[in-house]
Amino acid sequence: MFSEKKKDKFLPEFDLSILRLTVQSLFCLFTLYIGYRFYLFFFWATEGGGYVPRPPAVEGFLPISALLGLKRFLHTGSYDLIHPAGLTIFLAALFLSVLLRKGFCGWICPVGFVSNLAEKAGKLWGARHRPPLWIDYSLSPVKYLLLLFFIFIIFIRMDLSSVEIFLRSPFNLAADAKMLNFFLDPSPVAAAILFLLAASSLVLPNPWCRYFCPYGALLGLVAFLGPVQVKRNQEKCIDCKKCEAVCPAALGIPRKKTIRNPDCIGCMECINVCPQENCLTTSVAGKNISPLLIPLGTVGLFLFIWVLARQTGFWESSISPVIFKKSYHLATILLPS
């Protein structure tokens, strides 16, 4: 785990790539466990199996509901108690982006982890290629257009009464069940899209995160205004381009002095692979900090927010299991998919 590279004057030097893979793996395993627990709850609600409590963390897969809850919270100060964990996770990701770049994307998000594994598999099989610039420039705006679409619909077109109606609707109550059905029984179109994304992830680095994720686009815009930056010392750079080879977002690090691009996910892979001492550094307000503080701060703050939410009642839904059961029946059986 410890690297024999240069010593960090702030904290012991870690192989950040191995650390990142470990942290991502643990969060992904937890996500799979949550998915399994929710499946058991869903099975109880729809098929009459043994009762298993609904895991609140499943609401992390409901970003639209969280965005609606955020609008109501900003306008009224009322927290969404139907899917409170979803709003809490959403706010935590935004907060982390303000302080630690897109640390949520780079260290916690399970989709980012799967993309990371696909990228490594593509490298191993010799299938990975950098996209031509015209493809990169053409697709890069897509995630921002999707973000603008959701912001326009939710924050401009929908009034508060419409938001309230949606949040209390059977469809929103059963949004987690609809999401589960999407993965268990995807439509032919959805299955084709998922297959194309998986296949393209072996060839292109992180296509979903780089081109299509509106969530990541929002976090990137927030992170752009944050204090953490990666700086490159031009005098010490030997132009080995190792940083460019490992950068998941293909940010062209060897051609920049400061890296604060919205697509930077704070993975610290570039600093980890740089052979020159103090060539690539992490800085806050012009002062160098250990890159290890990014994962430590990201995971630590995220877990702190989780504990705080549990203690203050902003994690467990106020909806009873019986109401969820009725909503699942209405949304998954009586309403079209």
Image (tube, rainbow, N blue to C red):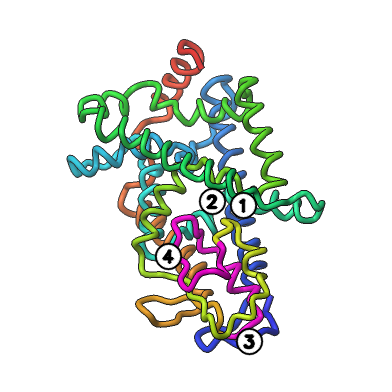
The picture places residue 57, in percent across and down from the top left corner, at: 47, 44
In the displayed structure, 137 sits above or below 191; it is below
**Residue tagged by mark 4?**
100
| Of labels 2 and 3, the one closer to you | 3
The picture places residue 50, in percent across and down from the top left corner, at: 58, 29
In the displayed structure, 193 sits above or below 31; it is above
Tag 4 or tag 2, which sits nearer the N-term? 4
Q: Of helix, strand and loop, which one carries label 4?
A: helix
Q: Are marks 2 and 3 in contact (CB under 8 Å)?
A: no
Q: Of helix, strand and loop, which one carries label 1?
A: helix
Which residues make up the magenta segment? Answer: 252-277
Q: Are marks 1 and 2 in contact (CB under 8 Å)?
A: yes
Q: Is residue 303 visible?
A: no
**Residue tagged by mark 2?**
109
| Quadrant of the frame with the N terminus | bottom right
The amino acid sitting under disc 4 is: Leu
Q: CA distance from mark 4 to mark 3?
A: 23 Å
**Nearer-the-camera pick, 301 or 52:** 301
Q: CA distance from mark 3 to mark 1?
A: 27 Å
Q: CA distance from mark 4 to mark 1?
A: 18 Å
**Nearer-the-camera pick, 288 or 250:** 250
Q: Are marks 4 and 3 in contact (CB under 8 Å)?
A: no
The amino acid sitting under disc 3 is: Lys
Q: Residue at x 57, y 21 (%)?
A: 48
Residue 164 is left or right of residue 225, and the answer is left
Tag 1 or tag 3, which sits nearer the N-term? 3
Residue 277 in which image quadrant: bottom right
